[in-house]
Amino acid sequence: MTSSSAKMTLISLFGLFLLPLTLAWLMYSGIIDFHPQETSNRGELVKPPLQARWPEEFDSRLLGRRWLAIYPVSLACEESCREMLTGLRQIKRALGRDGGRLRLVVLSGRAPVAPLSESVAAIDPEIVVIEGAVALEQQLGKIGTSGSTFIVDPLGNIMMQYSPGTNANDIRHDLDRLLKYGKTDPQ
């Protein structure tokens, strides 16, 4: 091997290792502006994630440090509400052992109404009903439309929103990935 070919090999070897580091630094510093066109999540990310505003009289520790699927409802749980809650219950079951890391929550900004609690308990007695949460209901109303479903992480951040009519498999797909990679909650 001649000295010029040895130098070229050495320069090529340095370039092979330095090029990815240089590109990574340029992208990190913002000189190269690269953002993927598509994401694999099916819901909308809430940017930036918002800290959920629980009612003052509600002890959010009752929910545990779990992922939450929150579904806001009006005064009564009608047909679309029952379908969504049934879908969320099926999602929780489909998650298998990770289903214990998810808690389903029905939220109402109104004063306690017995028929709401009773109709939700008929679907699944493990669903938590939080009534009188006006501030949280208003906060969620600014993020999504009426009938949206929201995902809250174990730290209390509202991070994903699903518009009404979203397929339950899309929510399950995202929750599956979140529970797989999100290890902020106790196992």
Image (spheres, grey):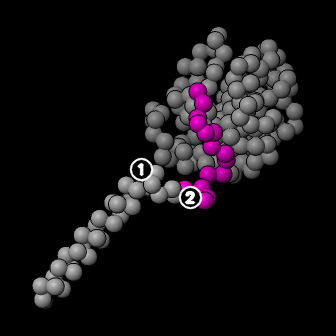
Q: Is residue 155 visible?
A: yes
Q: Nearer the viewer, residue 21 or 67?
A: 21
Q: Is residue 121 visible?
A: no
Q: Nearer the viewer, residue 165 or 25?
A: 25
The residue indicated by pointer 1 is: 29
Q: Amino acid at mark 1?
A: Ser
User: Which residues fall within the magenta stretch?
Assistant: 35-51
The image position of residue 171, as x and y in percent, is: 67, 47
The image position of residue 45, as x and y in percent, is: 63, 43
The image position of residue 160, as x and y in percent, is: 64, 40
The residue indicated by pointer 2 is: 36
Q: With respect to residue 161, does 6 lie above or below?
A: below
Q: Residue at x 60, y 45 (%)?
A: 175
Helix, strand or loop status at disc 2: loop
Q: With respect to residue 81, does 53 lie above or below?
A: above
| Apparent side of residue 7 relative to residue 159 in the rendered image (left or right) | left
Quadrant (top left, top right, bottom left, bottom right) of the N terminus: bottom left
Q: Residue at x 53, y 31 (%)?
A: 154
